[in-house]
Amino acid sequence: MLTGGKPGNKGGGRRPKKFSTFLKSLRDNPDVHDAITKAATDHKSRGFGAVVKLAAEYDEDKPKDQKELTGELVIRVVRDTNVNAGE
């Protein structure tokens, strides 16, 4: 289903435009919104766990997993004078 990946890498590549357009139409569909709302508010629904997990993963207030390195970076270059230059 994905295109643009390397041979043997089944998970690589990008989604085809047609598939992305289809997913956008689902996201914009009010019937899909209603179905998600019903599943999220009925704990006996088969989709309850999946919808709650999805909502938690896309929570705007969820901290990003990115790590930021702080502090000073020092790079030291040492010239090796023991190497024979003529070889």
Image: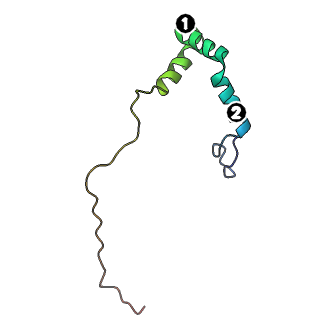
Relative to 71, is 14 on the left or the right? right
**Residue at point 34%, 85% (across, down):** 83
- Say the numbered circle drawn on residue 42: 1
Q: Which mark is residue 21?
A: 2
Relative to 3, residue 64 above or below: above
Q: CA distance from mark 1 to mark 2?
A: 30 Å
Q: Are there few (<14), some (14-19), or many (20+) residues within 10 Å of tag 1?
A: few
Q: Is residue 43 visible?
A: no
Instruction: Decide: is 85 above or below 70.
Output: below
Residue 60 spot, x, y in % from top left: 44, 27
Q: Amino acid at mark 2?
A: Thr
Q: Nearer the viewer, mark 1 or mark 2?
A: 2
- Judge whether 12 appears above or below 40 on screen: below
The first of marks 1 and 2 along the sequence is: 2
Taking 82 as reference, is 21 above or below it? above
SS type, badge 1: loop
Three-letter amino acid code of the residue under disc 1: Asp
Can you name the residue that lies furthest to the bottom here?
A: 86
Q: Looking at the image, which residue is at 71% across and 40% down? A: 16
Specify the quadrant of the image occupied by residue 78: bottom left
Res 38 → quadrant = top right
User: Is 10 placed left or right of 86 in the picture?
Assistant: right
User: Label 2 crowding class (10 Å Cα cut-off): few <14, some 14-19, many 20+?
Assistant: few
- The image shows residue 18 at horizontal and vertical percentages of 74, 36
Is residue 84 at all visible to an observer of this figure?
A: yes
Element assignment for label 2: helix
Q: Residue at x 67, y 40 (%)?
A: 15
The C terminus lies in which quarter of the figure?
bottom left
Q: CB under 8 Å between callouts 1 and 2?
A: no
Residue 1 location (% of width, % of height): 72, 39
Residue located at (51% from left, 18% from top): 52
